[in-house]
Image (spheres, rainbow, N blue to C red):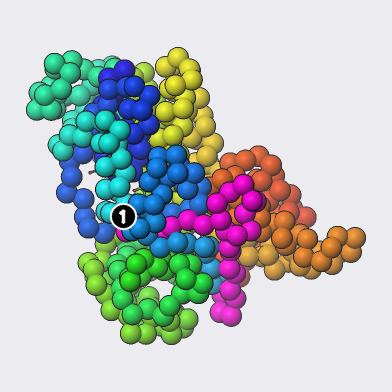
Amino acid sequence: MKIAIIGGGPSGSVCATLLTQRGHEVAVFDEGGRPEHIAGESLVPGLIPLFRRMGIEDQVAAIGVRKPGVTFFPAPGKEYAFSFSSLPRQFPPYAYNVPRPAFDRILEARAARAGALMIPQRAELIAHGEKLQLSAETLASAGIWNGCQPDFIIDASGRRRLAARLLNIKADVGPRRDVSHFAHYEGFDPETPSGQVRINRLADGWSWRIPLQSKMSFGIVMDQKAAASLGKTPAERLEAAMRNDPLLSLETRGAKRVSEAETYANYQLVSTQGVGENWASVGDAFGFVDPMLSPGMMLALQSAELLDKNLASHPLGAALEAYSTEMKGILSAWRDLIDYFYDGRIFELHDRGREFQMKLPFLPLGFIETFMSANMSGMASGFTTADPWSRGVLKYAERFVLGTTPFPSRYAIA
Ligand SMILES: Cc1cc2nc3c(=O)[nH]c(=O)nc-3n(C[C@H](O)[C@H](O)[C@H](O)COP(=O)(O)OP(=O)(O)OC[C@H]3O[C@@H](n4cnc5c(N)ncnc54)[C@H](O)[C@@H]3O)c2cc1C
């Protein structure tokens, strides 16, 4: 097939690599001009097998920092360290933190090496009934395929959601109305263990610290009004958030901002329809859930892989249906899992799990904790997020440890 991909970010570039390797004629349009600092720096272990298959893990390791896990600070004096070393043995027990532009360039270069045609220009789509086409100007200026339309179009335009907007496809909007600011800093206290991502629950939201080579990415996620009360500019808000939180103020003493502060808002969007007669969307263009647990890049690359796999295994209509169903299931599983962190259930489970184990003296001490940690790591690493068994175990534990009545948790994030 002749395939046009709109967007050469991570999802578009990985689609291009995989589909070109299958023998398709692929052209990737990217308008360029991406900012030097882009969110999406903390990756999950579920991506490592794909990096290995694409032969790029060494390059990712060279620009990144090995990430052994994530530590949450959900209340004063409370610290929960999740380590990927508790993953079942068949999964790699680590991920990477990466500077986005350099990471994106590795993926782009991989697509070009595979033989995809990289076209540095903005593409315009037009609707022809339910079908999508490239505009005549886009085709003409690209000078490809003798001016003929592609057989298939992939929307990898990110949160711009080109196809969905053109076809008036609605998005399921998530429950939160947060804004996020982030910037790079030097001079933070060193994280332990090295490379560990740290998440602090704040009075009105949460913050991330993602160690990069010689820098720290610091970001806040909070309700828009609460963020506005911290200062006028994104940089002021970041610095106020550091000062106001007792633990952060201690650990960020001496921190110096070394980049512009960036802003993201209204990003919880999942398209109600991610495929059409001759098109499919991947990555954020299909859906983005939330920055909590860092699922964005996993979803972006996984969607590219799933689309490629389905296109190779079924006739077009069936392939798109299978792809769409699978992606919707994965997006919804991430949303469910992330809810456990926002409403504090995950930490309540951890606390009360120990008391619960006492009621089961026939089990070896620590058995439930080890088992639940492995289950949670598998889900948060992207390997078993949508796996019915893993989700069932979590639900079952919740029912027996926390009961069925909803309760306000002291760990809930405002
Ligand atoms: C606050 C925040 C924090 C996040 N943190 C993380 C994290 O720690 N870890 C993680 O994994 N994910 C994170 N994410 C998510 C991650 O940034 C995205 O999921 C990821 O960038 C999606 O990749 P993509 O390829 O789908 O889209 P994008 O990266 O947005 O790429 C889209 C590309 O399309 C191009 N484009 C768009 N329209 C056109 C057009 N008409 N013609 C040509 N080119 C076009 C753009 O130039 C761009 O290059 C975060 C997101 C937010 C909002």
Residue that appears at 39% across and 52% down: 58
Q: Which residues lie in the magenta part?
A: 75-100
Left or right of residue 79, residue 33 in this image: left
Residue that appears at 71% across and 48% down: 393
Q: Is residue 189 above or below residue 174?
A: below
Q: Is residue 82 magenta?
A: yes
x, y percentage for residue 200?
A: 48, 71
x, y percentage for residue 360?
A: 87, 61
Q: Is residue 192 magenta?
A: no
The residue lying toward the viewer, choosing from 343 and 142, is: 142
> How crowded is the residue under tag 1: few (<14 C-alpha within 10 Å), some, or many (20+)?
many
x, y percentage for residue 96?
A: 43, 57
The residue lying toward the viewer, choosing from 6 and 165, is: 6
Disc 1 residue: CB within 8 Å of ligand 1: yes
Quick one: quadrant of the N terminus?
top left
Left or right of residue 270, residue 381 in this image: right
Q: Secondary structure at mark 1?
A: helix
Q: Number of callouts in the render?
A: 1
x, y percentage for residue 125?
A: 21, 27
Can residue 336 be seen at all in this image of the molecule? no
Residue that appears at 58% across and 63% down: 83
The residue most toward the right is: 362
Res. 85 image quadrant: bottom right
Amino acid type at circle 1 is: Arg
Q: Is residue 96 above or below residue 48?
A: below
Residue under label 1: 100
Can residue 65 be seen at all in this image of the molecule? yes
Left or right of residue 167, residue 88 in this image: right
The residue lying toward the viewer, choosing from 280 and 174, is: 280
